Amino acid sequence: MQGSHRGAELHDQQYREQLAALLAQYWPHAEIYDPLADHQNSIDYDADRGKRVFFHHNRLCREVDLVLAFVPEASMGTAIEMWEAHEHGRAAVVTVSLLVHNWAVRFLSHEVYPDIESLESALASGQLQRRIAEVLAERNNPTATTK
């Protein structure tokens, strides 16, 4: 949300509505959690509340089926969420980013799309849903092999 801003400000967050609409259209039974939706004023939280929310959101990434990361520029918070999902969770990590050479994006993502339009194409074709199912099968049963 803050990306690389040095001050207490957020980047444009309109992409969240686009992503939620795509998921609702192509994956209608998905339960979507948007950390900003319940914390519109998080930038103004005091240190104790901010810390609680930060760690809670990162723990959630261990419990969900999918972390959909939008990374137009480096984001320490998003990288931590991706790490938690990839290393400690059961989630598939799907990233929308042009930062394909960034190691966090490259090595923590199960799929990377350069833009929202490419993500939509993968959803419309069913390719992304199949890939997520493969990842979840592997993560939930590590002794099984998938093609």
Image (cartoon, helix red, strand yellow):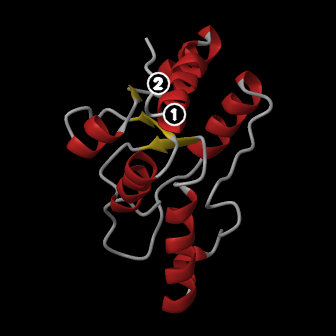
Counting from the top left corner in percent of width and height, residue 43 is at 53, 76
Looking at the rendered structure, the secondary structure element under dot 1 is loop
For label 1, count other residues whose C-alpha is less than 10 Å away and answer few (under 14), some (14-19) or many (20+): few
Residue where numbered disc 2 is placed = 144
Q: On the rendered structure, is 108 left or right of 35? A: left
Residue at x-position 51% and y-position 53%: 12
Looking at the rendered structure, the secondary structure element under dot 2 is loop
Q: Which numbered marker is on residue 129?
A: none
Q: Where is 12 relative to 55, above or below? A: above
Q: As drawn, which residue projects farthest toward the right?
A: 29
Question: Would you say the residues marked 1 and 2 are in contact, meaning their CB atoms lie under 8 Å apart?
Answer: yes
Counting from the top left corner in percent of width and height, residue 145 is at 43, 20
Residue at x-position 68% and y-position 52%: 33
Residue at x-position 58% and y-position 59%: 60
Residue at x-position 52% and y-position 55%: 62
Q: On the rendered structure, is 22 left or right of 28? A: left
How far is mark 1 from mark 2, CA to CA?
6 Å
Counting from the top left corner in percent of width and height, residue 67 is at 53, 44
Q: Name the amino acid, label 1.
A: Asn
> Residue 5 versus residue 69: which sits nearer the camera?
69
> Residue 108 versus residue 102: which sits nearer the camera?
108
Q: Where is 10 relative to 52, above or below? A: above
For label 2, count other residues whose C-alpha is less than 10 Å away and answer few (under 14), some (14-19) or many (20+): few
Counting from the top left corner in percent of width and height, residue 102 is at 21, 41
Q: Name the amino acid, label 2.
A: Ala
Q: Where is 12 relative to 109, above or below? A: below
Q: On the rendered structure, is 133 left or right of 81? A: right
Which quadrant would residue 113 be assigned to in this image? top left
Asked if one can make out residue 20 in the rendered structure from this viewpoint, the answer is yes
> Residue 93 versus residue 46: which sits nearer the camera?
93
Residue where numbered disc 1 is placed = 141
